[in-house]
Image (cartoon, helix red, strand yellow):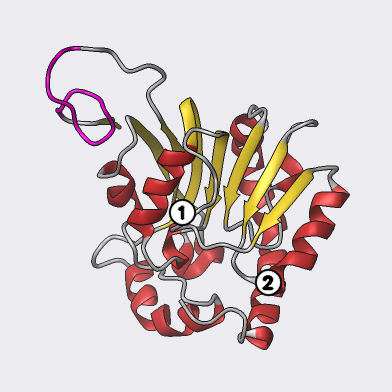
Amino acid sequence: MPDLEKQKWRSRLERRLLDAGAADSHAALGDRKTEIIGAMRGTVVEIGPGTGANMRYYAPGVRVVAIEPNPHMHDRLRATADEHGVDLEIRSLRGEAIDVDDGAADGVVGTLLLCGVDDPAAVVAEAHRILAPGGTYFFLEHVRADHGTGTRRAQRVMKRPHEWLFNGCRIDQDSGALLRSGPFDTVEFDEIDRGIGAVWCRRQIIGTATKIAQQESTGGSTGPTGSPEGPQRWR
């Protein structure tokens, strides 16, 4: 990831592009976001909120801790939160190391996140660590298109320009496999086609990962999450 402090002009361009795409994303996925994000209560940690595209979905009374390392996004993010009456706290941290206590977040949100961080597996691990037992991590990611498709060819061509425009975002990452291999007890997502208008970002996944609500004592060996060793569940 580039030095965000120094990327003033590039970040301004990225900010405008994010704002420009927010309306289309809301039209296509707003109902799903409202269903899941809108059901979250208490304290929610949103990792990489950018300019605040998800602020409109939070229910009244929810406290949002925004982990946003790009300082050039902060003013727009605050304004969007104020517009939607969100109780917002911004922390200038990277998602790989979040200063939130274990299990302190009632919900975690990360949209178009894992493609743009230095260590996506570490970010997923942090989301799991800070999430309360029984809590939900909501995610939306654009992912690598299938081999041999026009979208995959476009991704190859646009890989470097896209990384420059969006401060290191990788359009060809298999975030679905990354989430499935992570620490969450269940991972469920749908693959969606955003249509030709999304060009090289048209293939996306949207879904949730959950942390087991209660550990059961079995007397046997346990895996890294404390649950009995064995295959994780997803679909």
Which residue is at 62% across, 70% downward?
Answer: 70
Looking at the figure, which quarter contains the N terminus? bottom left
State whether residue 115 appears in this view: yes
The residue that label 2 is drawn on is 71
Which residue is at 18% across, 12% downward?
Answer: 218
Q: Is residue 226 magenta?
A: yes
The residue that label 1 is drawn on is 141
In the rendered picture of this protein, how many numbered marks are placed on residues?
A: 2
Which residue is at 73% across, 47% downward?
Answer: 55
Q: Main secondary structure of the magenta part?
A: loop
Residue 231 versus residue 174: which sits nearer the camera?
231
Q: Amino acid at mark 1?
A: Glu
Please give the label number shown on residue 18.
none
Which residue is at 68% across, 80% downward?
Answer: 13
Indicate whether 235 appears above or below 64: above
x, y percent for residue 199:
49, 69
Q: Is residue 32 magenta?
A: no
Q: Amino acid at mark 2?
A: Pro
Looking at the figure, which quarter contains the C terminus? top left
